[in-house]
Image (cartoon, coloured by chain):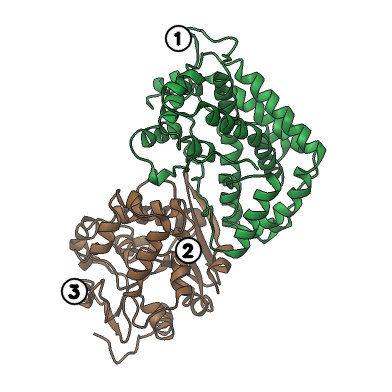
Amino acid sequence: MNWREFQSMQRVAELGDRFISYLDEGTGEPVILIHGIPVWGYLWHALTPALAKQNRVLAPDLLGFGYSDKGDWFDRSIARQAEMIDAWMEKTGVERAHIVAHDIGGGVALRLATLFPHRVMRLCVMNTVCYDSWPIEAMLQFGHPETRRKLSAASAITMLKGALKQGFAKSPDDELLDSLLAPYTTEVGKLSLIRNAAALNTNLTTEITALLPKIETPTLILWGEDDLFQLVKYGERLARDIPGAQLVRVKDARHFLMLDQPDEVAEHVSAFLKGEQVETAHAG
Amino acid sequence: MLGFGKQKQVTEHEAEGEIERVYHEIRQSLRVTGINLNFRTWAGYEKFFPAMWDAMRPLAETRAFETAADSVRAEAVRAADKLPRLENQARAALGESQAYQLRAALDLYHYINPKLLVFTSAVKLALDGEQPEQSGKASADVELVERGVPARMYPMEMVSSEPEEERIKELFGDIKQTLSLSSINSDYRTLALWPDYLSAGWEKLKPIVQGDEFKRASDNLRETARKLARTLPFPVPLSRERVEELGEDAGEIAKTTEKFERLLPSLIINIALFSLDWKTPETLVQSPFPATPRRMAVQGGAR
């Protein structure tokens, strides 16, 4: 599925004065897929078909990301995003859902699991931000307000493509990178991404550290073990702190493990959502 | 060809100093998420632009100005309603979220373009040495409208004026040639976010804009805007002499302003035509973003 087809399948929900766009495919127990920065819901395009065979797959673009509201007048922190997911679930009548999340989406998921536990059936985080693992240097710099003047939208895309490449085990083709960054090619998109980067805040994961041992939700931690952005040591720490959590290291994968190893990741997530044991030689 | 002088446009992200200050005030005072082509072009005259804005800003914040723009918008809708409908089949291919955002984008331009036309007409009159007939009212007697961008207004997002995608490049070329433009307007650059929709819409729109009925409607709208600009409550302290004193080419600026005044009525009707595919004429004659009086907003605590 190309990104324009994905975009044309997105639905929309108004949440107060804001709106979010989201994919809603399949039937069964709902699973919400939450992307990270600097991408959008299209991140999950390779995983969606497999999950939609057994689940209702909901993949929102976070506020300020993708084709959700990109106005320059609201908070985009992971705290606000978790509140948004809660409000969106209420609006769409989804009482509880499995949560599968990546990067800062993982930070949103950890906040949901600790602060909105009634919403979460099963939790799967992938190369997630946690503790003080973030923000990475490149995103900190990108989030500076002066970036707006220093970089045109085209220059920003070139820079981000270079950075994104580091997140893959094998060099991705240009079309994939263009697709992941498609919503940010305009000046409005660029500015929105700058504001998203400016909202990255370590405190919003450190403040829930003490709550992690209280998570009762079954938890799977998937980690592309060669990730240069989010090191696997953080996954190991999460696995120790969240009771019963299982860490699975995905070999030959970096940050974007669901694109580096789509079949393996789909297999692990599908099994986990069905309540089956996740079998792997690389379990931590 | 409607050229806009030799001056380079100043984009929002490039704006610095006085231009940046004025862009911010435009967004707040005109209640809009972005800076349209005529402001970006005027900003190329870096001495003229802040002086022009400072002269126009008191007028642009009045209820009289907002009401004048509302009248222009309503006339444009009534005129568009008499033209053939676009019945843009491409809307069927839009997804739910895409359609939602497209409608929001149309509302943005349906709101701001009539304000731009009245604004441009007032600048043109001032440069021609003509002042509003009722100017000279005490400012205490004039109602001001709230400032700030409406909460649900769509961001003025647009593709590059020189897009890489071949079909959008060709589309922009055709629009520029047909409408005799040297630069593509913000409106079409925004609609190009949904290229299939714009492409199908333009195919229907192209013969309409070349017809006599459309040209008459456009001329009438320009006349209406001029008449309304003459009824605004304050004088505009701007003249060719003042512009020359600033070291700018008053003749070139007047020509540029006149070209915008000629271009905007068609654009307003075109947006009304696109909007009529989604909303009734009765809805569209109303402002999509009605402004409350500023005094009431202060009493409500929202300064």
Chain B appears in which tint?
Answer: green
Where residue A237 sits: x, y (%)? 18, 74
Please, what secondary structure does the residue beneath circle 1 have?
A: helix
Query: Is residue A20 depicted above or below A122 in this figure?
Result: above
Answer yes or no: is residue A76 visible: no
Q: Nearer the viewer, mark 2 or mark 3?
A: 2
* Chain assignment, label 2: A
Please give left or right for residue B111 compared with residue A50 in the image: right
* Chain assignment, label 1: B
Please name the residue that numbered disc 2 is placed on. Answer: A182
- B118 or A7, nearer to the observer: B118
- Point out the residue furthest to the bottom here: A281
Are the numbered discs 2 and 3 placed on the same chain, yes or no? yes
Name the amino acid, label 2: Ala
Name the residue rendered at 30%, 73% in the picture: A127
Q: Mark 2 or 3 closer to N-term?
A: 2
Please name the residue that numbered disc 3 is placed on. Answer: A237
- The chain that appears brown in the image is A
Name the amino acid, label 1: Ala
